[in-house]
Image (cartoon, rainbow, N blue to C red):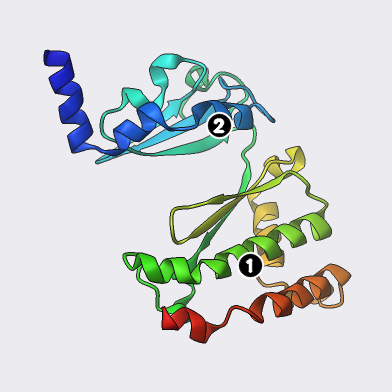
Amino acid sequence: TLKSAKNFKERRMNPKLEYYKKFFPIEDLKTFIRLNSTLEQQEIVYSCETYFVRYKQWGDDSQLPSAHPSLLNVHLGPIYPGRVEKRCSPTTLPARKKLVFDIDLTDYDWLHLDKKDLPLCDAAWPLAAFAVQTATFLLRELFGLEDVIAFYSGGRGAHIWVCDERACRLSEEGRRAVLAAISAPEKASFLLDHPSTKEAAESALAFFEPVSYTHLRAH
């Protein structure tokens, strides 16, 4: 039929569409969103081949990922005071947004990683796992944040999402301060003698015993 032929053509042009139609864990993500928001307040952003689609929400089935044939990626945007599509104007500010940290192995220049070299990225991935472990530890110990979760980001690293309500309401200045503390605690003098910083350093020594730079480059 014409409909079957059209669906086959869409799948051939965009293999990801099959994933979003059949395997995308949308119900799990809806549960995640409902932890501190509603489906109607959480903005969903679709990254397509040549454009972005913003201000969607999963309270409406017509706005689900499978409705976009050229879809490449799905992003969770900020949380609005009311329904996303009913915001007062394009300048309406979000009520809050989750605190997110991006750990990208290609940012470590000394690794000389090429994002297209998947075997080497896989070999270096323990470094990303260690960064997640250390950052999560410091977020909990230094700032008392509890609702912290890490997601694999597709070969080159991980994303750390902090969902505590007070973290979601942090200003941009506050977010920068938290980032500075967990990414380079040695530059923050008040952290040098903090027990949490020392404990994180001790866990680093244990981690790097089985994982070495020489081992990574050998792959």
Viewer-side residue, 210 vs 164: 210
Q: Is residue 58 left or right of residue 81?
A: left
Image quarter in which the N terminus is found: top left
Residue at image mark 1: 130
Quadrant containing the C terminus in the rendered view: bottom left
Whether residue 168 is situated above or below residue 144 in the rendered picture: above
Badge 2 crowding class, 10 Å Cα cut-off, few under 14, some 14 to 19, many 20 or more, is: few
Going by the numbered disc 2, the residue's amino acid type is Leu
Residue 79, image x, y percentages: 59, 31
Along the line of sight, which residue is nearer the eye, 93 or 210? Answer: 210
Residue sitting at 42 percent across and 32 percent down? 23
Which residue bears the numbered disc 2? Answer: 29
In this rendering, position of residue 34 left or right of residue 75: right
Q: Amino acid at mark 1?
A: Phe
SS for dot 2: helix
Residue at 44% in and 32% down: 24
Local SS, label 1:
helix
Residue 188 visible, this angle:
no
Position in image of residue 30 (x %, y %): 57, 26
Q: CA distance from mark 2 to mark 1?
A: 25 Å
Q: Is residue 139 left or right of residue 132?
A: right
Residue 124, image x, y percentages: 49, 71
* Residue 67 at least partly seen: yes
Along the line of sight, the residue nearer the viewer: 3 or 148: 3
Give the residue displayed 58% in from the left and 33% down from the top.
Answer: 94
